[in-house]
Amino acid sequence: MHRTDHRHDVGGDGDAPGDADRAGLVADSFRRLFGGDPDGVWAAPGRVNLIGEHTDYNDGFALPIALPQSTLLAARGRTDGLLRLHSAQGDGRITDLAVSGLAPGAVAGWAAYPAGVVWALAEAGHPVGGADLHFDSTVPTGAGLSSSAALECAVAVAYDELYGLELSGPELARIAQRAENGFAGVPCGIMDQMASVCCTAEAALHLDARTPEHHQQVPFDLRGQGLRLLVIDTGVSHDLGDGAYAALRAGCERAAALLGLPALRDLRTEELPGAVRALPAELVPLVRHVVTENARVAEAVSRLREGNAAALGPILDEGHASLRDDYRVSCPETDLAAAAAQGAGALGARMTGGGFGGSVIALVRAGTESAVGGAVTAAFEAAGYRAPRILSVTPAAGARRLVPSAATP
Ligand code: ADP
Ligand code: MG
């Protein structure tokens, strides 16, 4: 008999090269691809949402943090109206587009996300032209960590400077969301883009999706409180995701209309029992999730403001149960990851992102990362699933220019 070793390597922020080194590399690649120097290098991060899932399109609340993993963009404006796109994670080719020819449905594949941002800016009446854009990202794609928003928001912040637009963070986030909804054809809410643009280091972003301008930074000093946050990428992404997301969204809108409310955000917790009696049975679990989830965001913000991040644990567990049992967007892999983490002593764990696969977050005490990570990996092995990828993350800064750096005159 052999003993199973439950220790496990958990990747941290420390294994990756720093922003300055990455910016230098992406600028070098830009020179090889396009010739000459980029005008600048920008970064936009991926995100995990601590709590407040499937609430943004109900005009509700969320509490995301930006990840240290980000998409870098080396960019240079062009005067001839051409948009040239290349990604280190793409198919190796440069995609050439005319800004004047951009229209929904006209661009296929990954290029729709960055091209959609240029289209959305032009649609909104901003005086934008072409550019040479080279991307290189450390955000895993399709893992529920919002690599799509990172890609869009990198373009939004770069164009803001290249074309002197001086838009606010929430305005840039709305442009990026419009690109994803109207150009790439994904009916997402505003949370991912708001997180990528407006998050700050060592804080969670308290987002009110009805008025993104009124977002607040809530101090989230994980390390100072002896805590760690694990991101467990299950490596699965179930295809039913897209259609199911649109159906859930439509169900929420129907429930709000039946209740005579602008959005489910306007249903108060004490009004929930009455709504349960008034609504068709199939809409009840959706409404219950949204109302209780908004309440969990408020609760989490209170605990963080008291300096008690460990108290987020039970809130994460309740959030996962609500997504699993009421909203029904979890899947066997995310359920197993959350349960294994909880069973191995995590303070709390839940799926994060839209669901049907993707990632699970686990809040753990410092020093227990390997035990929790190892338990999840062992559970996956026993279930016959592919090994998950586990990262320890800290709240990072939102989208910003890296080069030329602020210190450069
Ligand atoms: P998520 O946002 O959770 O990572 P999505 O399905 O919304 O998952 O977005 C993933 C898609 O975004 C990829 O399939 C690809 O088209 C595009 N994408 C994201 N990052 C990059 C990148 N660095 N290079 C090329 N395409 C990217
Ligand atoms: Mg996405």
Image (cartoon, grey):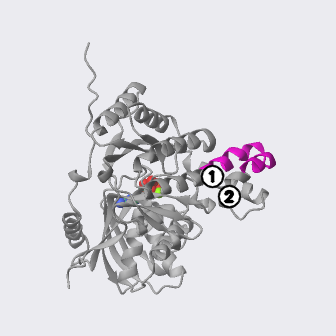
* Mark 1 residue type: Val
Whole-Å distance between the Cαs marked 1 and 2?
A: 7 Å
Would residue 188 be seen by someone viewing this image from the given angle?
Answer: no
Determine whether the beta carbon of the residue marked 2 sits less than 8 angstroms from the nearest atom of ligand 2: no
Q: Residues within 10 Å of mark 1 (few under 14, many from 20)?
A: many
- Dominant SS in magenta: helix
Place of residue 363 in the rendered image (x, y in percent of width and height, measured from the top left): 39, 44
Q: Residues within 10 Å of mark 2 (few under 14, many from 20)?
A: many
Place of residue 42 in the rendered image (x, y in percent of width and height, measured from the top left): 31, 71
- Report helix, strand or loop for mark 2: helix
109 left or right of 60 in image: left
**Extreme-top residue of the structure:** 1
- Marks 1 and 2 close (CB-CB < 8 Å): yes
Magenta-drawn segment:
272-292
Name above or below for residue 6 compared with residue 11.
above
Quadrant of res 25: bottom left
The mark found on residue 40 in the picture is none
User: Does 41 appear in magenta?
Assistant: no
In terms of sequence position, does the residue under pointer 1 or pointer 2 come before the other?
A: 2
Name above or below for residue 155 compared with residue 344.
below
**In the image, what residue occupies the spot 36% across and 78% down?**
131
User: Does 284 appear in magenta?
Assistant: yes
Name above or below for residue 289 compared with residue 73.
above
| Residue occupied by mark 1 | 290
**Extreme-front residue of the structure:** 306
Q: Quadrant of the N terminus?
A: top left
Name above or below for residue 116 compared with residue 223.
below
Along the line of sight, the residue nearer the viewer: 104 or 71: 71
| Residue occupied by mark 2 | 264
